[in-house]
């Protein structure tokens, strides 16, 4: 109610009535489209702020409901809401969710052809669309700047707004184009910037970079009272992982750094009786969607994934998030760990830490910042690989197979990727996340030769007939095709169509290039020669220093035995009025040290006796035993760690069979 009191103090009674009427309208929209009766804390404050025309920065932890803060006010007014989002997969997911609710939404990103983008703009102009999602690299193009003027944009939203700050952990140079967009749009259109992770310096930087007319921040405390942070020092991570999912019921996420490890750990869990699956960005979209859906429905208990999993996933009952490797920053860790316990019931964020992990993380500094001579070499050989002359290529986008590029030039994939990112920060190129490059097909034989082949191969004749009827120009140049649509016409499976097209390719009847997931490489300026290539200090040395600082922060988090983990996180994000949480691994360890071994053993024995009778909560055990709840919680944690007790599906403690 803070914003409402502030606003009403300067308003006449008639204006207050209008504001209250709008509140009712927002409530109706929330109920009609999203099915919620009430807003979460801070949501309505942010909605009122942007609705009054003020530039607004909303800081809300993961799962706080950021999307509602722009979707509701956009539905309450005429015109279209423009949303800048960094991930193509996330944009597609949000557009599909809005469409499922009967709301017209569209997206424009680098994976689209010029014709597709033009069609999307025309649909938004004439089709009463409410949301247009756009990837940041499209903002600076002349095509976009011309077409956006024709739309009735009434709200500009910047999702993952920390990406605009060079102090942030995930800076994207393309985000700097957003401020230029404000010069194209009418002056009275407010900006709503949203993020779940921002340090105090990033908060200030976001508002400056987006040209806020005044500082205006709504922040929700990053404190998560229901989330227990645990760091476990172990050399046997697989064994400890198994212990976690044996003792804690409910769904979980395990984050790892490599795609290969997702399957290895998933297989290990399955072999030990825990329903698990794996997920990473390199999987086909259909497979990713199926895995994600099975996990959300509870058909799969544990998903083992890279950090490609989780953004935009709305699953409230995740009981545990485990990291088997150290992330690069506390920002990334906090965001990923925060996917546990969104239903506000007890949940756990567990970091498994081995002796060599800190040294391994520090070695990433050299990998992430290869020598500048190598970076310049990559830039020149990139142009050779793409056959791009000096002075050409501005705004050109190329599907880019980094593995093939590295094979040609005998480069390390890891160092090459980071060299490309340095070139991106320097303003020369942009490398998008992986997108689907559609399958292509072209006939390799003449029409007469194809006719003879069809007579002799009746089984494949039907497939060829459907392809010829569905697509034109197949004898002149490669044409994009969709195997799923072809399969529907043939009343068969996509896999069968794929197999038959591969067979036709081997018989030299067609030239078939199946769908492949690759990023796009975009030249943000014309190619320069080697002598003119400059790597600025801000793109290399300054970023390296900040990266080292973030690495030291996550190592401190994993190593500390004295500072409450919850307090350490809150201080990192600028919250000063904090207190020990009493439930993290550091707090529990300190409490145990304050108890005599005899008293501690006595409490453990009483807990086991109570749970032999019936499951109970920590508070219930404390009452029955007549002991301090903090001491009981410490004993409970130790008994869980040693495999004697665990939580059941009702989140009550019970004895385990040993």
Image: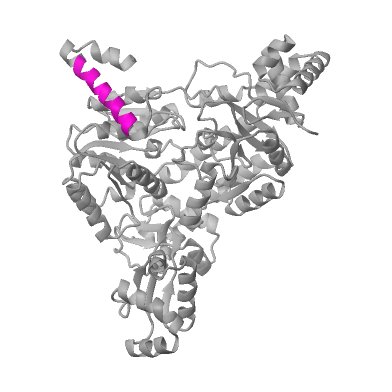
Q: Position of residue 182 (x, y in %)?
A: 23, 38
Q: Is residue 636 left or right of residue 531?
A: right
Say which quadrant the N terminus sits in.
top left
Residue 28 visible, this orientation: yes
Colouring used for the render: one colour
Q: Residue at x 77, y 23 (%)?
A: 612
Q: Position of residue 567 (x, y in %)?
A: 56, 22
The percent position of residue 337, horizontal first and vertical second, equals 55, 34
Q: Which residues are magenta?
A: 17-32
Q: Residue furthest front?
A: 491
Residue 485 location, quadrant:
bottom left
Residue 380: quarter of image = bottom left
Q: Is residue 286 left or right of residue 476?
A: right
Residue found farthest to the right: 598
Q: Position of residue 300 (x, y in %)?
A: 58, 45
Up the image or down, 465 lies above or below 569; here it is below
């Amino acid at each position: 109610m803070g914003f409402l009191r502030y606003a009403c103090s300067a308003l006449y009674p008639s204006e207050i009535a209008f504001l209250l009427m709008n509140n009712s309208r927002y409530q109706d929209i929330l109920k009609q489209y999203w099915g919620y009766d009430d807003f979460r804390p801070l949501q309505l404050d942010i909605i009122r702020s942007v609705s009054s025309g003020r530039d607004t920065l909303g800081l809300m932890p993961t799962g706080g409901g950021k999307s509602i803060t722009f979707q509701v006010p956009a539905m309450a007014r005429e015109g279209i809401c423009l949303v800048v989002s960094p991930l193509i997969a996330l944009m597609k997911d949000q557009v599909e969710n809005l469409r499922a609710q009967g709301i017209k939404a569209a997206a424009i990103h680098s994976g689209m052809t010029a014709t597709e983008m033009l069609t999307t703009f025309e649909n938004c102009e004439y089709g009463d669309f409410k949301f247009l999602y756009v990837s940041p690299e499209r903002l600076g193009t002349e095509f976009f700047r011309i077409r956006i003027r024709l739309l009735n944009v009434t709200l500009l939203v910047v999702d993952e707004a920390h990406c605009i700050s060079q102090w942030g952990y995930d800076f994207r140079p393309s985000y700097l184009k957003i401020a230029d967009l404000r010069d194209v749009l009418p002056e009275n259109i407010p900006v709503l910037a949203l993020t779940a992770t921002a340090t105090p310096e990033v908060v200030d930087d976001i508002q400056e970079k987006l040209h806020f007319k005044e500082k205006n921040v709504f922040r929700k405390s990053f404190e998560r009272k229901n989330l227990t942070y645990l760091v476990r020092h172990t050399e046997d991570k697989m064994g400890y992982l198994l212990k976690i999912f044996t003792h804690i019921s409910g769904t979980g996420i395990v984050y790892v750094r490599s795609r290969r490890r997702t399957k290895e750990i998933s297989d290990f869990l399955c072999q030990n009786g825990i329903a698990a699956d794996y997920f990473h960005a390199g999987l086909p979209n259909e497979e990713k969607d199926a895995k994600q859906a099975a996990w959300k429905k509870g058909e799969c208990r544990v998903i083992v994934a890279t950090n490609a999993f989780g953004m935009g996933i709305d699953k409230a009952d995740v009981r545990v998030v485990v990291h088997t490797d150290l992330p690069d920053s506390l920002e990334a860790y906090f965001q990923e760990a925060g996917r546990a316990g969104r239903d506000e019931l007890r949940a756990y964020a567990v970091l498994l830490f081995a002796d060599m992990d800190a040294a391994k993380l520090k070695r990433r500094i050299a990998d992430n910042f290869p020598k500048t001579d190598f970076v310049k070499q990559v830039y020149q050989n990139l142009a050779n690989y793409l056959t791009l002359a000096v002075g050409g290529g501005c705004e050109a986008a190329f599907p880019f197979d980094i593995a093939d590029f590295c094979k040609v030039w005998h480069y390390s994939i890891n160092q090459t990727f980071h060299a490309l990112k340095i070139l991106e920060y320097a303003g020369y190129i942009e490398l998008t996340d992986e997108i689907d490059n559609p399958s292509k097909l072209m006939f390799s034989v003449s029409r007469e030769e194809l006719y003879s082949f069809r007579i002799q191969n009746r089984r494949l004749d039907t497939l060829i007939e459907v392809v010829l009827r569905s697509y034109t120009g197949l004898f002149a140049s490669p044409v994009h095709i969709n195997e799923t649509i072809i399969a529907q016409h043939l009343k068969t499976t996509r896999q069968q169509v794929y197999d038959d097209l591969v067979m036709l390719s081997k018989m030299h009847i067609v030239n078939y290039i199946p769908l492949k997931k690759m990023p796009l490489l975009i030249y943000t300026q014309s190619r320069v020669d080697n002598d003119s290539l400059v790597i600025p200090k801000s793109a290399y040395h300054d970023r390296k220093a900040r990266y080292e600082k973030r690495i030291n922060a996550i190592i401190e988090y994993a190593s500390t035995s004295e500072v409450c983990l919850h307090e350490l996180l809150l201080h990192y994000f600028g919250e000063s009025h904090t207190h020990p949480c009493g439930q993290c691994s550091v707090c529990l360890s300190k409490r145990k040290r304050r108890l005599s071994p005899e008293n501690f053993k006595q409490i453990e024995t009483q807990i086991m006796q109570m749970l032999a009778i019936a499951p109970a909560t920590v508070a219930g055990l404390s009452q029955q035993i007549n002991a301090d709840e903090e001491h009981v919680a410490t004993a409970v944690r130790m008994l869980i760690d040693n495999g004697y007790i665990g939580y059941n599906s009702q989140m009550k403690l019970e004895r385990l069979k040993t």
